[in-house]
Image: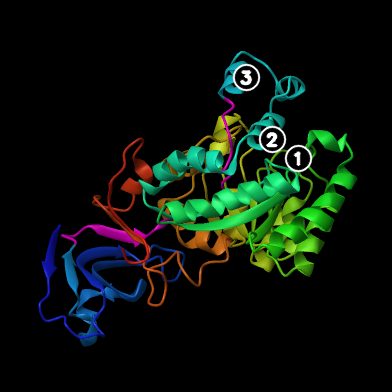
Amino acid sequence: MTRTPDTHAAAASAPDRLWRNARLATMVGTAGGLGIVPNGALAVRNGRIAYAGPQSGLPADLRHASEVIDCEGRWITPGLIDCHTHLVHAGDRAREFELRLQGASYEEIARAGGGIASSVTNLRAASEDELVRQALPRLDALIAEGLTTIEIKSGYGLALEHELKSLRAARRLGLERPVGVRTTFLGAHALPPEAGGDADAYIDSVVRQMLPALAAQGLVDAVDGFCEGIGFSPAQITRVFDAAARLGMPVKLHADQLSNLHGAALAARFGALSADHLEHTDEAGVMAMAAAGTVAVILPGAYYFIRETKQPPIELLRRHRVPMAVSTDNNPGTSPLTSLLLTMNMAATLFLMTVDECIAGVTREAARALGLLHETGTLEAGKWADFCLWNVEQPAELVYRLGFNPLHTRIWRGQ
């Protein structure tokens, strides 16, 4: 790639940079395609896209930039977005992985102090600085593959001081690295040991204490819950979502992963940004999501890691035109995955999602799942200049390859 300074770009109105001679996958257009522009240009001014389209249509006032970059035919896509992660956690659960390989059940591991309970113990023992230190390598691995925006959930603290610590650590990651961070409060993730098995009393503390306090500090972008037999009932999640609605906060839901408690329909009833996992969702749930505009977040890493056999209803989601995002679900217990490129391949291989669906799933639809489609996820004028240049001959290579990173350059906010 050659970079050519333009000595004529002295006007204050000139864009910061112009990328030319590129092939664009704008993710804009009809029928859910990639929005391909075979001979394209992309201009950036003040960290925002000023133009993305055919090079022949570049407006005259955008042709002279402080820096003109010849992409030499490389592909440009929107920056990658990981819309469902538990990136901030302490320690690992590698020993549990070994035990499962030896035949131990999840219940046996949990009774021995493993499972989410072990992650709660580890997180509570860690300082905020330690959480940031441990999370940075995971974040760096994602950034190295083109990540520009990430969602990070709490949910391993399960008490106000520790949920606060988790969310502060997550926000700090966005200061430590050039990446957009969205934080989600997942207080309704599991019962802490001090709850003594009283789920309703614990939900009281989530609704009356934790959520208002964290919202008052501006640390919560969305509210999530785990609606499952080993998590919380639909009635308990409804209480959490009612509290979020009173505070004007969007919601999302871990829904129908292990059984069909009609979590997808519950999420849709609250106009949720997304319902995630969905392995056991039925057609009624899919139809409810379609009517509500709720995004389906597909998480092949967890399906693979815990050796699930029930696949999410991809064909039903297609039939009812529910947008599908794809995400790593990075977490220490069921998806220690830090590669969106591998995640796309898994979605294609395990669930037969198409190349277009996979790439849209980590760009446009991931942005939609975070309520950020007005700001990112496609290459359109006015949106953040978050995009990637790839050393590939066709977009399918981003999904096809295993253990290979073709990223040439990652651009975040035009830099």
Q: How crowded is mark 1: few (under 14 residues within 10 Å), some or many (20 or more)?
A: many
Residue 164, horizontal then vertical, whole percent: 67, 50
Question: Would residue 287 be visible to someone looking at this image?
Answer: no
Return the mark for residue 190: 1
Mark 3 → mark 2, Cα distance in angstroms: 20 Å
Label 3: which residue?
A: 100
Q: Say if the magenta span includes residue 82.
A: yes
Q: Which of marks 1 and 3 is nearer the N terminus?
A: 3
> In 3D space, how far apart are the residues under numbered discs 1 and 2 (Cα atoms)?
9 Å
Residue 180 percent across, percent down from the top left: 47, 59
Report the span colored magenta.
71-93
Relative to 252, 345 lies left or right: left
| Amino acid marked by disc 2 | Val
Say which element carries label 2: helix
Camera-side residue: 284 or 171? 171
- Pointers 1 and 2 in contact (CB under 8 A)? yes
Q: Which amino acid does label 1 sit on?
A: Ala
Q: Nearer the viewer, residue 274 or 89?
A: 89
